[in-house]
Image (spheres, rainbow, N blue to C red):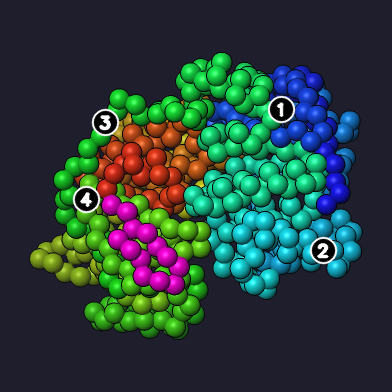
Amino acid sequence: MGASGARVRAENFSWHHLGREKPSLAGLTFEIPAGQKVLLVGPSGAGKSTLLHALAGLLADEDGRSASGSLEVEGQDPTSLRGVSGLMQQDPEASLVLAKLGDDTAFGPENLGVELEEIWQRVEEAHRAVGLDHLPLDLPTSQLSGGQKQRLGLAGILAMRPRLLLLDEPTANLDPDGVLEVRDAVVAAAQSTGATLLVVEHRIGVWAQQMDRILVLDREGGISHDGPPSQVLAQAGEQLAAQGVWVPGHDPLAGQDFQLPAAGELLLSACDLAVSRQQPGPKEAKAYRKGLAAGQQPSLPLATLAQGINLDLYAGQHLALTGKNGAGKSTLALTLAGLLYPAAGSVSAGPALLVLGAQDQKKPLLPWTRGRLAHPSPHPLAWSASQLTRRLGLVFQNPEQQFICPTVRQELEFSSRQVAKNQGQPLDETQLAQRIEELLEELKLAHLQEANPFTLSGGEKRRLSVATALATAPGLLILDEPTFGQDAQTWAGLVRLIRQLLAQGKAVISVTHDQDYIDALGGASYQLTAAERGRP
């Protein structure tokens, strides 16, 4: 592969995002020799992703006030370099450029002027390294799962053969087998090319033995520890754990026992459900909804990801959706939430979920009358936005898809204000403020309440997306990879919050690969296998 590593040097480097009270990075001084493998860790919001973006040349000090000190790659300003650094960002969607699998991986080397024959050789090697070689090169990238997109983003970086590999949580959304597969591929690529490697991860146990060095950022954006992994963990393990670093052998929930409450009333059911990423056209969708209204169980000619799914979810219950990348977990979650049409079968809400907010509905979309109370259709697919918001909270795999307001506080207030507006009722500002303060405090976002949501770290965005889903106190919460980007402390806070919801009789569905999270909440698990029946 014939590459070599790039030397990195920082001298009192600081970076301050516009509109933020404190700098993201403060006075960093370090040097990384060419070819060294470095694990960059620290609490959520410590500036790890910001540092990777700076090294990739993606931070421009346009007003002359954001940056101070110096940061160099091979003795040059990173913004002036081309083809030296390769950055894999936290959001896998951010790495996708073209519509087809092979073309997307080929995009980088093509722009670097690599010969055509070598480009496709690199594409095949990169796909084989990250476990995508079983997929056709002309497969639309829109048909990939989140974990597969993460693998594709890494393949695109490897195909460029950069001298500096910058990877931001490259295994966060992968199934357990995929974590080890991708880790080994990254380490092998760095060794074969001589590239310098800088990896951001919260759970350091997966990477520590493969790396030459651990560099720890603290909550103030500075460096708290730096050295060989074994030395740093031996000398400062307890201190790092207290800061939120995932230190092997330390349980952030130690001594905090939890017992699930007894299952309550039925909230949601899936009957012989088949899920698909494809969606029907307007005519087919209209006919499907008409069939639901007539009490039928219609089907659609859609390519099926998983089928034969039968689930019952009760108040106070936690359900974990598990399975390998591409099995259809996120698609199932969106189908249960009424945002995707099923290929077959049905999703229906129980009376206990239907009654939530029914008294306040001015004009239900498809009324079902039970006594004097008008309920919406039992099928979430037929619910209006306001009917959905009161009953069901959804956290997407990509949290940025949910943000629409200029500040964190306004983002948390938005849904409650919209519900009150749709119901034609005055909003209790005191009660709203109290609810928002509780969420900000529990999820460690209080110091960011006036910040723009898009300037938050990946872990902070994830916690904000969870908080927005909770703001209207829905009866059912559906979370897609809720622990992505969390340090040990924020992870524990998230688990405690969900435990409180379960104790209150709420139900929670989690799409997750995080076994610690599953164990901490208990409940049931449902494993999906692509194009086969799920196994309860």
If you read the primary sequence from the N terminus, does the residue marked by circle 1 or circle 4 appear first?
1
Range of magenta residues? 524-536
Residue at point 64%, 36% (across, down): 210
Mark 3–mark 2 Cα distance, whole angstroms, equals: 54 Å
Instruction: Report the mark closest to the observer, 3 or 4.
Output: 3
Residue 465 in view in this figure: yes
Q: Residue furthest left?
A: 371
If you read the primary sequence from the N terminus, does the residue marked by circle 3 or circle 4 appear first?
3
Residue 69 x/y as whole percent: 80, 22
For label 3, the SS is loop
Mark 4 Cα-neighbour bin, 10 Å: few <14, some 14–19, many ≥20: many
Mark 1–mark 3 Cα distance, whole angstroms, equals: 41 Å
Q: Which residue is mark 2?
A: 119
Q: Which residue is mark 4?
A: 315
Is 525 within the magenta?
yes
Q: Which residue is mark 1?
A: 15
Q: Amino acid at mark 3?
A: Asp
- Give the number of callouts: 4
For label 4, the SS is loop
Q: Nearer the viewer, residue 244 or 129?
A: 129
Residue at point 64%, 72% (across, down): 136
Residue 10 x/y as whole percent: 78, 25
Mark 3 Cα-neighbour bin, 10 Å: few <14, some 14–19, many ≥20: few
Residue 21, by quadrant, is: top right
